[in-house]
């Protein structure tokens, strides 16, 4: 789904691809609403969000917590160098809606189960 440069909310196909991978294993870009604006975070996931339940429901809890994802701030597009805040300013509604969809994948979502401690009680 590559659109013309003026109508696309992303600076390049690379960033659009990263955003489309949110929640999948591997690298992705998540949009998160921090209260004052939407920011992008580069996330690496060892387990896809859709498969987290396989670890959370493990009947043999581990003695450690599994870290299935980690993320860091994304100030510039890793492919073309465009400043992410410029993209958000150009299409604020798009990124706000994206942040609502991506929240469930984020490390800030406290409703996600703690993995490696067996079933929630």
Image (tube, rainbow, N blue to C red):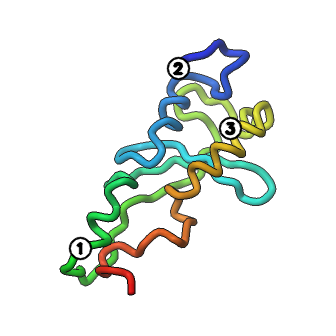
Asked if residue 115 lies left or right of residue 92, the reply is left
Asked if residue 86 lies left or right of residue 4, the reply is right
Asked if residue 2 lies left or right of residue 21, the reply is right
In the rendered image, the vertical position of residue 116 relative to residue 82, given as above or below: below
Residue 105: x, y in percent?
A: 50, 56
Residue 84: x, y in percent?
A: 68, 38
In the rendered image, the vertical position of residue 62 relative to residue 8, given as above or below: below
> At 53% across and 58% down in the image, what residue appears?
104
The Cα–Cα distance between marks 1 and 3, rounded to whole angstroms, is: 39 Å
Residue labelled with disc 2: 1
Say what secondary structure mark 3 lies in: helix
> At 51% across and 63% down in the image, what residue appears?
107
Residue 116: x, y in percent?
A: 30, 76
User: Do labels 3 and 2 touch, CB within 8 Å?
Assistant: no
Q: Residue furthest top?
A: 4
> At 57% across and 65% down in the image, what residue appears?
108
Asked if residue 67 lies left or right of residue 108, the reply is left
Say what secondary structure mark 1 lies in: loop
> At 50% across and 27% down in the image, what residue appears?
14
Q: Earlier in the sequence, mark 3 or mark 2?
A: 2
Residue 4: x, y in percent?
A: 65, 12
The Cα–Cα distance between marks 2 and 1, rounded to whole angstroms, is: 38 Å
User: Do labels 2 and 1 touch, CB within 8 Å?
Assistant: no
Residue labelled with disc 1: 58
Classify mark 2: residues with Cα within 10 Å, few (<14), some (14-19) or many (20+): few
In the rendered image, the vertical position of residue 44 relative to residue 6, given as above or below: below
The Cα–Cα distance between marks 3 and 2, rounded to whole angstroms, is: 20 Å
Please name which of the two marks, 1 or 3, marks the residue nearer to the observer: 1
Q: Earlier in the sequence, mark 1 or mark 3?
A: 1
Give the image quarter of residue 70: bottom left
């Amino acid at each position: 789904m590559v659109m013309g440069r003026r109508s696309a909310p992303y600076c390049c196909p690379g960033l659009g691809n990263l955003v489309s991978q949110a929640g999948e294993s591997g690298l992705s870009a998540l949009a998160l609403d921090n209260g004052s604006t939407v920011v992008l975070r580069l996330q690496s996931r060892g387990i896809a969000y859709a498969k987290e339940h396989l670890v959370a429901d493990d009947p043999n809890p581990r003695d450690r917590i599994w870290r299935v994802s980690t993320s860091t701030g994304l100030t510039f597009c890793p492919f073309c160098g465009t400043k992410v805040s410029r993209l958000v300013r150009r299409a604020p509604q798009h990124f706000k809606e994206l942040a609502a969809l991506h929240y469930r994948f984020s490390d800030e979502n406290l409703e996600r189960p703690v993995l490696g401690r067996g079933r929630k009680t």
